[in-house]
Amino acid sequence: MPKAGTYLLQKVVNLITKRPVVWIEPNHLSDFNPATDLNPNDTNIYLQHLLPPFDAICKDQSGKYIKVVLIRDPRDILISQIYWIKNGMDWVWWTPQEILQHCIMLSFNECLKYAIHFPDKHFSVRFFVKQVLKWMDDESAFICRFEDIIGPEGGGNRLLQERTIRDLSKHLNTPLTDQEIFQIANILFGGTATFRNGQIGSWRTAFNEDHMRMFKESMGEELIRLGYEKDLNW
């Protein structure tokens, strides 16, 4: 999911496997077909956001692919997304420029309201949440939560971080020693290309009552299905 810690995932996979992670550039997606354009016999590690062409891999149960999906609380993703847009960063390549310029002109609170109900046709947070829910039904995919991998410097838990690194390394067929896991956890926080503050729960100080009501209407049930809330009473 965009703004879920993509570069964090890239960093930890690189540290585990000692192999580079290859970005599949967005401008290739118009004619990109993973089913035919990726060679399952190579040793490349590919990284991309959950865009429609990757539905083919999501549905593939042949065992040809080792699948890892990074997810994050969508409320925190929204906050990260708005900071990115308000700073003039044109990461949302699939969004018309007039919409991005409109977001920049809004106050942070108004931009957050706008982003909560952003159209799915422009690949909103809600769109990516729906994509994630498809992947979570795939038992062969490793679901890596940002909150589990970020560690205590980001508001997480060190033991959970190390356990997640260990489980991820096994899923990648590269099991690590306790010492290797300890060393990776020590250097994992920060230092990536789009790092801002890497904190869990930033939405709590940014959402007001209107934001919470609107989010519950837009993605409340999905938030529960993702495991970030037990009900709508938050």
Image: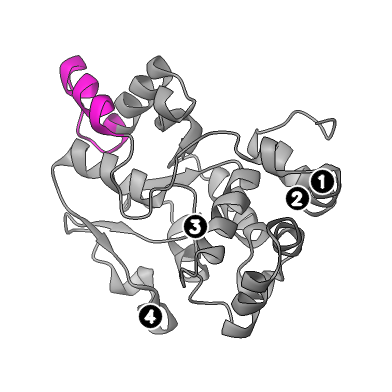
The residues bearing labels 3 and 2 have C-alpha atoms spaced at a distance of 16 Å
Q: Earlier in the sequence, mark 3 or mark 2?
A: 3
Residue stretch rendered in magenta on the structure: 169-188
Evaluate if marks 1 and 3 touch, with contact meaning CB atoms under 8 Å apart.
no
Type of amino acid under label 2: Met
Type of amino acid under label 4: Asn
Task: Name the element at disc 4.
Answer: helix
Query: Residue 216 has which mark?
Result: 1
The residues bearing labels 1 and 4 have C-alpha atoms spaced at a distance of 33 Å
Residue at 33 percent across and 72 percent down: it is: 25
Q: Earlier in the sequence, mark 4 or mark 2?
A: 4
Circle 3 residues within 10 Å: few <14, some 14–19, many ≥20: many
Residue 160 is left or right of residue 230, and the answer is left
Type of amino acid under label 3: Pro
Circle 1 residues within 10 Å: few <14, some 14–19, many ≥20: some
Type of amino acid under label 1: Lys
The residue at which mark 2 appears reads as 219
Evaluate if marks 2 and 1 touch, with contact meaning CB atoms under 8 Å apart.
yes
Task: Name the element at disc 1.
Answer: helix
Relative image position of residue 190 (x, y in whole percent): 33, 40
| 156 vs 164, nearest the viewer | 156
Q: Is residue 45 above or below residue 212?
A: below
* Magenta segment main secondary structure: helix
| 34 vs 214, nearest the viewer | 214
The residues bearing labels 3 and 4 have C-alpha atoms spaced at a distance of 16 Å
Query: Residue 27 has which mark?
Result: 4
Residue at 38 percent across and 18 percent down: it is: 158
Relative image position of residue 12 (x, y in whole percent): 28, 39
